Amino acid sequence: MTTPQEELLPGTRRALLHRIAVAQAEGRAPSLVATVVRGGQAVWHGARTSVDGHGPDENVQYRIGSITKTFTAVLVLRLRDEGLLDLGDPLEKHLPGTGAGEATIADLLAHTGGLAAESPAPWWERTPGSLRPELADVLGEGPLPHPVGRRFHYSNPGYTLLGALVEKLRGASWDEVLQREVLEPLGLDRTSYHPRVPHAGGWAVHPWADVLLPEPSEDLGRMAAAGQLWSTTGDLAKFAVFLAAGDDRVLSAGSVREMRTPAAPAEAADVMDGTSYGLGMQILRRHGRLLVGHSGSLPGFLANLSISVEDDVAAVVLANCTSGPLLSTVGADLVRIVAEAEPRIPEPWRPLREVDADVLELTGQWYWGTYGFALRLTADGLASLEPLSGAGRRSRFRPNGDGTWTGLEGYYAGELLKAVRRPDGTVSHLDLGSFVFTRQPYDEGASVPGGVDPDGWRGIG
């Protein structure tokens, strides 16, 4: 259920309505429906339709296509978190005989498994899934046009394999597992394998005339894990909240953060476009902000889910046309409108409850050679190492409980930070993955690799 729209300012609400109205009119969509999420709940809902007197609301189902892949990825990450598999495992370890070679589970999640983009003809999105009853029918005779792990190549059959993996390890159908482990705990009661009334019909709009053609709605069968689901903007709004914050009943905050982390090598065009892919989630840079989520399409339907975790704003946009408005752009615009018109108000600053004196001693200015850095303690119990110049390597570090810290991001991700002390207990230097950080540039009293010239600093004369 959406909360009162007065939670957004009138100008913001009008700007959102204007954006979807332009998208529906210029994209010639029979209907377009959208919801905006902020602060963990839906705060705006809008719809435009070509049918007089009928506007779809947040409870009308649309087909969401490849947003289904994100749901499948959640199921796989649950298996990992339970210890039933490792993302580095070859698929063959758990599902032998598929012909997927040595592609790992992580490869399949990130579309780096080398698999073809589509199943063999006829086109699976517009034909019954009964034509492809077995995995071999989905993969075909030459399923690996690319080397495993070398490049990002979007693959629908790859997610079919992940759906089969879920079925094998759970001993139940993919949709049954999804219903039990994700949809029910998150309260997504309007998300389903088959459409439920009320739902939109799928249409093709003629490219050169304002006329329509109904699209078939097929049961995708084996390919279901790649694109079968029907959902609503209301349910996808709840799903967006989960993907931003996690829910321990389904998947922890750390695991959904892992899904949002780039996992596929980007090609040159992707670098230029600012796009990447995580574990079942698309990652894009738009309007200077990072968006995560997924787009989807099937004949008759378009869908987009866009989340800015930093802004605490998400948008869901659904339309019932095969081609038309570019919903990824619409979703990004809806996020931008709210984030810029009503920027997130930060939580009040609060001091730490307690701090270890030995840890406090490490804060302040440090030098790696001649590069200046500052080490700070943050209210969330982490340490932050940042260059004083504003440019350079930076990372947050989590405490390990033994006086050492592990890097969480960037160049220092996974690297160990520790204080090296002299016999009298005073700190000599910091060691970060063999890099020595000293209180003064090339401090002669510290263990600087290569030593320090005994004549010290000098001018040129």
Image: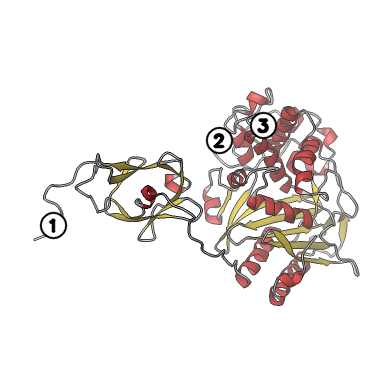
From the top left corner, tell me how far across and down residue 126 is, in percent.
82, 44
**Which quadrant would residue 166 be assigned to in this image?**
top right
Residue of label 3? 143
Picture colour scheme: secondary structure
**CA separation in Å, label 3 and label 1:** 65 Å
In primary-sequence order, the first of circles 3 and 2 is: 3
The quarter in which the C terminus is drawn is bottom left
The kind of residue tagged 2 is: Gly
Residue of label 1? 458
From the top left corner, tell me how far across and down residue 422 is, in percent.
25, 41
In primary-sequence order, the first of circles 2 and 1 is: 2
Nearest the eye: 135 or 215:
135
Q: Residues within 10 Å of mark 1 (few under 14, many from 20)?
A: few
With respect to residue 217, does 285 lie above or below?
A: below
Q: The residue tagged with tag 3: helix, strand or loop?
A: loop
With respect to residue 427, does 232 lie above or below?
A: below
From the top left corner, tell me how far across and down residue 111 is, in percent.
62, 40
Residue 72 in view in this figure? yes
From the viewer's perspective, tell me whether residue 385 is left or right of residue 266.
left
Residue of label 2? 149
Residue 114 in view in this figure? no
Q: Residues within 10 Å of mark 3 (few under 14, many from 20)?
A: many
